[in-house]
Image (cartoon, rainbow, N blue to C red):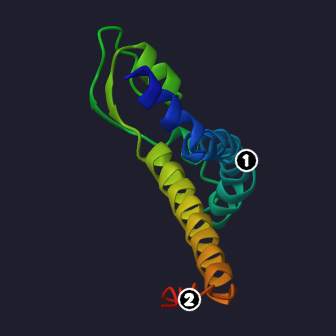
């Protein structure tokens, strides 16, 4: 079993996957910053100065009720049950951006694979 594991690790797919996960995590931070620091302020400005990070609906007040809450953090700290739709919108935009980038990357890889010349191996039968 140990030799099978060594063979699995040495194939290279695991290292490729590890590199992909690390780069993906770093890219996620870039997209988070882009959405939170560039896109959402523009969306907020277009919607009349709305700050989407603090957009929420209180379903039920918490134990330490102080409604209306000044922020989403205050509502959560008070134990209120909330729907944080502003956060959802922000995450949805992040997902769409990441999905688009992954689509473009897969499309580019497929295009490179199509343009590579195909190698045809011709085997000749042994002469009699």
- Of residue 16 and residue 48, the one placed in the foreground of this image is 16
Marks 2/1: CA–CA distance: 48 Å
Q: Residue at x 62, y 40 (%)?
A: 15
Q: Residue at x 69, y 45 (%)?
A: 23
Rendered location of residue 127, percent (x, y): 52, 90
Rendered location of residue 66, percent (x, y): 40, 17
Q: Secondary structure at mark 1?
A: helix
- Residue 69 shows in this picture: no
Q: Residue at x 60, y 52 (%)?
A: 50
Q: In the image, is residue 31 above or below residue 8? A: below
- Residue 2 shows in this picture: yes
Q: In the image, is residue 23 above or below residue 66? A: below
Q: Is residue 30 left or right of residue 5?
A: right
Q: In the image, is residue 122 above or below residue 79? A: below
- Mark 2 = which residue? 122
Rendered location of residue 87, percent (x, y): 49, 43
- Of residue 87 and residue 101, the one placed in the foreground of this image is 101
Q: Is residue 66 left or right of residue 55?
A: left
Which of disc 1 and disc 2 is earlier in sequence? 1
How many labels were placed on the picture? 2
- Of residue 54 and residue 118, the one placed in the foreground of this image is 118
Rendered location of residue 26, percent (x, y): 70, 41
- Mark 1 = which residue? 30
- Of residue 68 and residue 116, the one placed in the foreground of this image is 116
Q: In the image, is residue 17 above or below residue 5? A: below
């Amino acid at each position: 079993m140990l030799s099978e594991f060594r063979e699995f690790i040495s194939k290279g797919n695991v290292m490729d996957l590890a590199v992909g996960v690390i780069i993906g995590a770093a890219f996620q931070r870039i997209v988070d910053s882009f959405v939170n620091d560039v896109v959402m302020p523009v969306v907020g400005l277009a919607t009349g100065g709305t700050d989407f990070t603090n957009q929420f609906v209180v379903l039920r007040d918490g134990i330490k009720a102080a409604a209306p809450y000044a922020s989403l953090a205050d509502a959560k700290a008070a134990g209120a049950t909330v729907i944080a739709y502003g956060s959802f919108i922000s995450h949805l935009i992040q997902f769409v951006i990441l999905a688009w980038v992954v689509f473009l990357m897969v499309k580019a890889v497929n295009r490179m694979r199509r343009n590579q010349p195909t190698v045809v191996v011709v085997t000749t039968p042994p002469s009699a």
